[in-house]
Image (cartoon, rainbow, N blue to C red):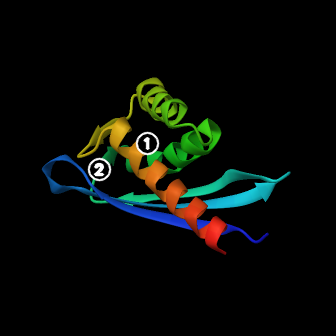
Amino acid sequence: MDDVVGRCDRKVEKGKLLRISVTLRSSGGVLVLTGVNVFGDFFMHPEEAIEGLEEAILRSGMDLEERQDGVSSYLSEGGIELFGASPADIALAVQGAIEDGLLKARSG
């Protein structure tokens, strides 16, 4: 099976937009998260922390609670400030992108 890309656009508090894209790949008959891109009109300080955020999401895998914990830990351990979105917002937007990818995989 080829990689499947899932996407989610999610409005969060105060009208900020999160735009997430994920790549899912079949590994032993199970879909695994192999790529994630986080975009939107939220802010992080320092700005270059976005790459680490994407890596933290990948490490957390497919579970929503683990993903939210992973995002929260990454931010707090790195002293990173997030404005316009919360770790829960990001975790839920990633979940939406994963669900979109799963639907595409089932129908394709």
Q: Residue at x 13, y 50 (%)?
A: 14
The answer to whether residue 84 is above or below residue 3 is: above
Q: Nearer the viewer, residue 96 or 54?
A: 96
Residue with the most extreme left position: 14
Q: Distance between the Cα atoms at labels 1 and 2?
A: 16 Å
Residue flagged by tag 1: what amino acid is it? Answer: Ala
**Relative horizontal placement of residue 73, taking residue 81 as reference (left or right):** right
Q: Which residue is mark 1?
A: 91
Labels 1 and 2: the sequence-earlier one:
2
**Relative horizontal placement of residue 5, taking residue 47 as reference (left or right):** right
Give the quadrant of residue 107: bottom right
The answer to whether residue 46 is above or below residue 38 is: above
The answer to whether residue 80 is above or below residue 11 is: above
In the rendered image, the quadrant that contains the C terminus is: bottom right
Q: Nearer the viewer, residue 81 or 8?
A: 8
Image position, residue 37 (x, y; %): 51, 59
Judged from the image, the secondary structure of the residue bearing numbered disc 1 is helix
Q: Residue at x 48, y 26 (%)?
A: 73
Q: Which residue is mark 2?
A: 43
- Disc number for residue 15: none
Q: Nearer the viewer, residue 103 or 37?
A: 103
Judged from the image, the secondary structure of the residue bearing numbered disc 2 is strand
